[in-house]
Image (tube, rainbow, N blue to C red):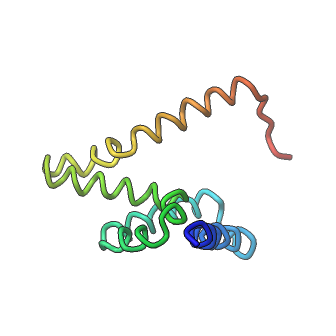
Amino acid sequence: MYYLWVFLIGGFICMLGQMLIIFTNITSARILVTFVLIGALLEACGLFSAISNFAKAGINVPIIGFGASLARGAINAVKSKGLIGAFTGGFEATAGGIAAAIVFAFIFSLIFKSKTKS
């Protein structure tokens, strides 16, 4: 049952993104930013952990989870370091994921030849 809920909730989030791409003129980049902001707002309002306890990876793995991690890191850093933590905390909390994305993007750029769309 656990995997079913993860699949349904994660799939619903992906379906929302796909519907926005198909039925609106919103670019993929703006949809990405919107999902990051939704995650950050859910974390700031204290709702993300309740949803995460139920949905598990269904909400944590999509980009919404990244937004929540950024917000959680910033909130915790503000509590411990003051105002400067608002600027550094999110990056400290997500540094591993950001570094992995950069390393893998570099490796794939060496392996594959990029092409522009016509």
Instruction: Name the residue at the top extreme.
Output: 110
Residue 26 screen position, x and y as percent: 65, 67
Q: Nearer the viewer, residue 29 or 43?
A: 43
Picture quadrant of residue 15: bottom right
For the point 14% across and 46% down, the residue is 81
| Total count of labels | 0
Q: Nearer the viewer, residue 41 or 57?
A: 57
For the point 59% across and 70% down, the residue is 13
Q: Is residue 86 left or right of residue 65?
A: left
Q: Quadrant of the N terminus?
A: bottom right
Q: Is residue 57 left or right of residue 111?
A: left
Asked if residue 81 is positioned above or below residue 51 in the image, the reply reads above
Q: Is residue 8 left or right of residue 78?
A: right
Residue 82 screen position, x and y as percent: 13, 50
For the point 68% across and 30% down, the residue is 108
Picture quadrant of residue 111: top right
Residue 102 screen position, x and y as percent: 54, 33
Q: Is residue 78 left or right of residue 118?
A: left
Residue 34 screen position, x and y as percent: 51, 65
For the point 77% across and 29% down, the residue is 112
Instruction: Name the residue at the right extreme.
Output: 118
Picture quadrant of residue 10: bottom right
